[in-house]
Image: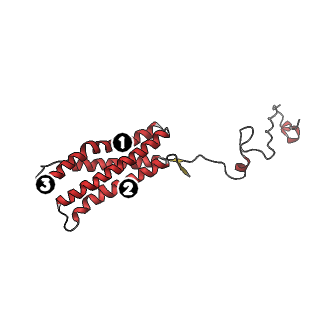
Amino acid sequence: MTTVRRPIALVCTFLWVGFVCAISFMEAWLKFRAAGVTVPVGLGIGQLVFGALNKVELVLAAAIAIDLVLGRDRRRRLLLAAVPATILLVQTLHVLPALDVRAVLVIAGQDPGPSNLHLLFVAMEVVKVAALVMFGIGLFEPAARTVEGPAAAQGPSLDGHGPARPDHQPRPAAPHHSGRWDTMHPKNLRS
């Protein structure tokens, strides 16, 4: 059995993965296959959709960050969450604005020249999704092992060794061994 320490972060993480996969890996290129969608029209749609996706991603990243900070999570988990958050910030502050400038030029009928920005953006999306999936899986933890059966109902023992005895009395101390095996007989332990 597994447990989830940060359910809000878990839900937000996999929602984020779903949004990015649906938009970046499906919608972005499928819209250009639709009848009547020209490159300028497709780029205009892309600007709107990716602008909205970026806002959703920022909200989800903020929710994850708040959940982790309030939960005082382990450093490793915080570092793993920092990877997609950093990629998102670079995309928000640098890559998407540069792609918007290029889209505006194409929509206006101008040639923006060759660029690798789309490839960079796609590579960042792949790394971001991989990091989110690893982070999300890391939010699952094995549950603590429990004692099952009649011993579980009795609770812990009074001496800390095994399940409680039915009479809730501590176990008798073992007598000093004199070297003779007949002194270890149960009738001789009652002294």
As drawn, the label of residue 114 is none
As drawn, the label of residue 83 is 1
Q: Which residue is mark 3?
A: 108
Q: Position of residue 30 (x, y in %)?
A: 26, 62
Label 1 sits on a secondary structure element that is: helix
Q: Disc 3 or disc 2, which is closer to the eye?
A: 3
Which residue lies at the image location 49% right of the left edge and 46% below the top edge?
6
Are there few (<14), some (14-19), or many (20+) residues within 10 Å of tag 3?
few
- Real-space CA distance between mark 3 and mark 2, rounded to the nearest whole angstrom: 33 Å
What's under tag 3, amino acid-wise?
A: Ala
What's under tag 1, amino acid-wise?
A: Val
Q: Earlier in the sequence, mark 3 or mark 1?
A: 1
Quarter of the image containing the C terminus? Answer: top right
Are there few (<14), some (14-19), or many (20+) residues within 10 Å of tag 1?
some
16 w.r.t. 73: above or below: below
What's under tag 2, amino acid-wise?
A: Gly
